[in-house]
Image (tube, helix red, strand yellow):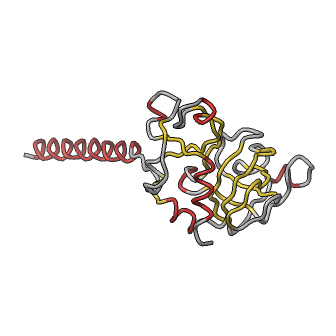
Amino acid sequence: MQTFTRRTLSALLVCLVVLAAKCKAQTRETITEPAPVKVEELFKQADLVAVVRILSGDAEHYPSAVYKANVLQAFKGTDEGSTVYFGPFVGYGIGEELLVFLRRSQKGIEPNQKAADSNLSYGPISSFYLAMYEGYSTLHIKYECLFDGKEIAQQCDYGVRVNTHQVVLPKTIKTFPSSTKGACSEEASWVRKSVFVVYLKTLPT
């Protein structure tokens, strides 16, 4: 009887261990994505909205990536010609233009201890901004030839690349399929920059 009870308890413990391991594995495999957001709501939530050009970046001397950018066109929370610092995601190129919707960091950002007393970093940044919705609020700007028009000159224009699954555009803004093929770009569309800019100017600040 005791042997049977011990075997039963041992089997029960093994089942519990296996079940716990499966639950833990399932927890590790869970992937969450940022919720979709309408562009007008994104504009409302952001402290800074602007077209910027990346001047430089530093992913070495701070806890996260920091980019220094020049404001080319301001829509909210900044002025044309201003310098802004933002992060924390990597992947932006020097000289690249972006349409950014950023939220101001409450704490700013400090360089790592080893870089604090050197001239290698930007130093302490009190006015530091964060990309929203896991980076989907920073939209790439590029010259593309995929827009509508009978002539090549009409089809080529500066566009804003938008993941329309994450950033929901109004139906009045026409989108065009991405020229990049592959699963990673299935949700990506292009909008004429001039059309996007006109729409942003109509939103209340």
**Where is residue 57 shown, x and y percent of the image?**
77, 44
**Where is residue 10 shown, x and y percent of the image?**
21, 43
Q: Nearer the viewer, residue 113 or 204?
A: 204
**Where is residue 84 shown, x and y percent of the image?**
77, 58
**Where is residue 34 shown, x and y percent of the image?**
47, 54
Residue found at the very far left of the displayed protein: 1
Q: Is residue 197 above or below residue 162?
A: below
- In the displayed structure, does residue 169 sit left or right of residue 24? right
Residue at image location 41% in from the left, 44% down from the top: 28
Q: Nearer the viewer, residue 41 or 151?
A: 151
Which picture quadrant has residue 35? bottom left
Residue at image location 36% in from the left, 46% down from the top: 24
Total marks in image: 0
Residue at image location 54% in from the left, 62% down from the top: 42
Which picture quadrant has residue 19? top left
Q: Is residue 41 above or below residue 190?
A: below
Q: Is residue 195 above or below residue 184?
A: below
Which picture quadrant has residue 130? bottom right
Residue found at the very far bottom of the displayed protein: 204
- In the displayed structure, does residue 157 sit left or right of residue 184? right
Q: Quadrant of the C terminus?
A: bottom right
